[in-house]
Image (cartoon, helix red, strand yellow):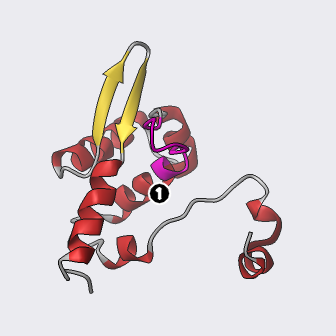
Amino acid sequence: MNRYIQDRWGDSLKHGFVVVPSELFKQQRKLQLDCNELVVVMNLLTFWHSNDEPPILSLRALEERMGLGTRSIQRLIKSLETKGLISVEKGVGERRVNLQLIADKLAQQTKTGQSD
């Protein structure tokens, strides 16, 4: 790990970290992400461990981390789906979240010069 990152964050990195492109924050308005939706996306990124397997959606984890109720989290997830930034794939006993949609959209906006 980069020493600069280790020096800055110290022991808080022991349980892992998530890479979030700065462009996600710069493009927040263009992606029409409100603050809570952005926090949901960042939390979902913590579950995304493999490109081959979308993360399992854990409403309970999001509720605990964000301090919101189930219905609020469900509305935020639905809003992200409606905006075409994620999709939720329902399986037997679990739901997986496709985050590649937001990654692709962000990459496309950056590539076409729609970046701030």
* Residue 16 screen position, x and y as percent: 69, 55
Report the residue at 57% width, 48% height from top. Answer: 65
| Residue type, numbered disc 1 | Met
Vertical comparison of 114 with 82: above or below: below
Q: Secondary structure at mark 1?
A: helix
Most frequent secondary structure within the magenta stretch:
loop
Q: Nearer the viewer, residue 49 or 92?
A: 49
Please identify the quadrant where the C terminus is shown: bottom left
Residue position marked by numbered label 1 in the rendering? 42
Q: Is residue 87 left or right of residue 53?
A: left
Report the residue at 55% width, 38% height from top. Answer: 61
Q: Quadrant of residue 52?
A: top left
Asked if the magenta segment contains residue 83, the reply would be no
Q: Give the magenta-colored segment's residue range.
A: 44-55
* Residue 110 screen position, x and y as percent: 26, 76
Report the residue at 21% width, 72% height from top. Answer: 109
Q: Tally the marks.
A: 1
Vertical comparison of 21 with 51: above or below: below
Residue sitting at the far top: 92
Q: Nearer the viewer, residue 109 or 52?
A: 52
Q: Is residue 73 left or right of residue 12?
A: left
Q: Quadrant of residue 25?
A: bottom left
